[in-house]
Amino acid sequence: MTTAITIQARMGSTRLPGKVLKDAVGKPMLALMIERLKRVPDVDKIIVATTTKPADDPIVALAEQENVDHYRGSEDDVLLRVLEAAQQHGIDVIVETTGDCPLIDPGTIHEIIETYRSSGADYVSNVIERSYPIGMDTQVFATDILADVASRTDDPQDHEHVSLYIYHHPEIYRLKNVLAPAELTAPDWRLTLDTLEDYTLIKSVFEALYPDNPAFSLADMFALFKDRPDLLEINSHVQHNWINKSS
């Protein structure tokens, strides 16, 4: 079974255009995320899934510079973009992430992959019931499951949000949620990149932790915030754009 981490990334963004290439510690956010994802064990590929728009040429250039694969597909039909990326690269299992999560923790991803492999579930994630900080979002499912979803729904919302149809239909798919350990539980923290305030916080985290320990973990972030609670105030007022999970 070939496993790949996909990263949905594009330059267009309503609240913070070009966010995935914004700089921290001398590197673009997307490059820092790829560096962290390369530390996830037992993964065969990392695929940056971007669009065919010329504006996204720099994302392709960065993927090539970082020696990871890429795929260019639809801007709006993200489900199809991820599905085609997996199919083109011969991937059996998709570990879905987005470029909004440069601080994503490799250890958390590894736990979710291992749970998927041992549970027999069709879909394993840490987002059905949130306990991890926003920005640790990881979803694992088979390419065949995503192909099944594509055959069942034409709803634009389902095609914009890759996994939405799966966790809306527990009567079709076997679902499993992974909860954070008590010491890493903070579902209201925004460690995701969507606004200028988010960028300021994430940049501050990298500047504080990366120089001494490029492989810093979520636990290291918790320790930092214990010493520097002011950092979490930077974006505490930002309203998160939740995907509707009730319909």
Image: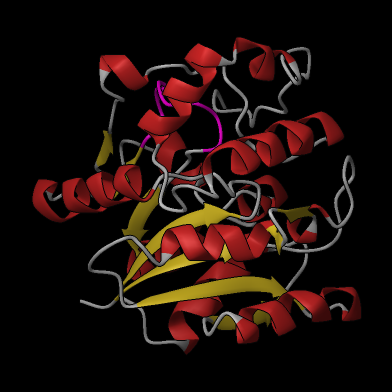
Instruction: Give residue 32's quadrant in the image.
Output: bottom right
Residue positioned most to the front: 212
Instruction: Give residue 79's quadrant in the image.
Output: bottom right
Query: Is residue 117 at all visible to an observer of this figure?
Result: yes
Where residue 153 appears, x then y in whole percent? 56, 55
Main SS category, magenta section = loop
User: From what the image shows, is residue 224 above or below residue 121?
Assistant: above
Instruction: Give residue 135's quadrant in the image.
Output: top right
Residue drawn at x 68%, y 54% as measured from the top left: 25
Residue drawn at x 20%, y 76% as measured from the top left: 1
Where residue 224 appears, x then y in whole percent? 50, 24
Viewer-proximal residue, 163 or 38? Answer: 38
Query: Is residue 8 at all visible to an observer of this figure?
Result: no
Viewer-proximal residue, 114 or 211? Answer: 211
Start-end of magenta stretch: 126-135
Residue drawn at x 53%, y 18% as measured from the top left: 225
Q: Is residue 56 left or right of residue 146?
A: right
Q: Is residue 130 magenta?
A: yes
